[in-house]
Amino acid sequence: MRKTKHTGLDFEVDKLTNSIENVVSGDSFRTEISVLTLQDLKNVTKKNAWVFDWKLEYKQPKREVYKLTIEGNSDIIQGLICLEVKEDHVYMHLIESAPFNKGKTKVYAGVAGNLVAFACKFSFQRGHEGNVSFISKTQLIEHYEKELGAVHFGGRVMIIHKETALKLIGKYFKDWEL
């Protein structure tokens, strides 16, 4: 089995929105999160400008990969997240916005924040009180503290606790209740 190297997550939280927001018009769009399928994987490739090997993540038995789409349009993936349920929390292995949602010419803002809020919601659903952890790239530790309210636990480990998780969930999943 191929060993994966933990270099740390380097997603950027551009903006915490109420959903995802069109950068040009400012219009907000409700989103849906569902399990990534084998069919979806055909378009989520390096050839199509995705950075990570999502096929490898998809094949990991303890991990689950989810896609973020705009409500009513499940064919166009806005972003992906790979999660693993641990003993007392949910661990974020990878998170990536779609290639068209990165950089200066991005179409939608709020994708990464939406995915992190989902990880928190997922943690509650699995009985872990919203607790989420991930490894950060060193230069982004302060960014995650400021933008997400994550706590720097030591080294490059970041943690999102219950109170912060509830705030993020409330922002993106208005009709969700504990």
Image (cartoon, rainbow, N blue to C red):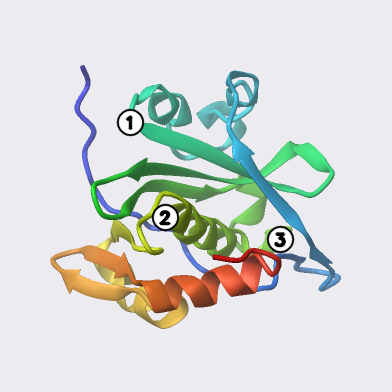
Label pair 2/1, CB-CB below 8 angstroms: no
Residue at 28%, 76% (x, y): give it. Answer: 151
Q: Residue under label 2, please give it.
A: 123
Residue at 49%, 73% (x, y): give it. Answer: 166
Q: Is residue 52 above or below residue 20?
A: above
Q: In the image, what residue type sits under mark 1?
A: Lys
Mark 2 nearby-residue class (10 Å; few <14, some 14–19, many ≥20)? many
Note whether residue 86 is visible. Answer: yes
Q: Quadrant of residue 63?
A: top left
User: What is the secondary structure assignment of the residue under circle 2?
Assistant: helix
Q: Say left or right for 24 vs 169.
A: right
Q: Is residue 65 above or below residue 136?
A: above
Q: In the image, what residue type sits under mark 2?
A: Ser
Q: Say left or right for 68 vs 136.
A: right
Q: Give the image location of residue 90, x and y in percent.
A: 34, 52
Give residue 108's mark: 3
Q: Is residue 80 above or below residue 106?
A: above
Using the numbered discs, state the Cα–Cα distance from disc 3 to disc 2 in whole angstroms: 25 Å
Label pair 3/2, CB-CB below 8 angstroms: no
Residue at 46%, 49% (x, y): give it. Answer: 95
Closest to the observer, 87 or 134: 87
Residue at 60%, 25% (x, y): give it. Answer: 37
Q: In the image, what residue type sits under mark 3?
A: Tyr
Q: Give the image location of residue 65, x and y in percent.
A: 49, 36
Q: Give the image location of residue 42, x and y in percent.
A: 61, 21
Q: Give the image location of residue 21, x and y in percent.
A: 74, 67
Q: Residue under label 1, please give it.
A: 62
Using the numbered discs, state the Cα–Cα distance from disc 3 to disc 1 in whole angstroms: 30 Å
Name the outermost residue toward the left: 155
Nearest to viewer (mark 3 / mark 2): 2
Image quarter hosting the N terminus: top left
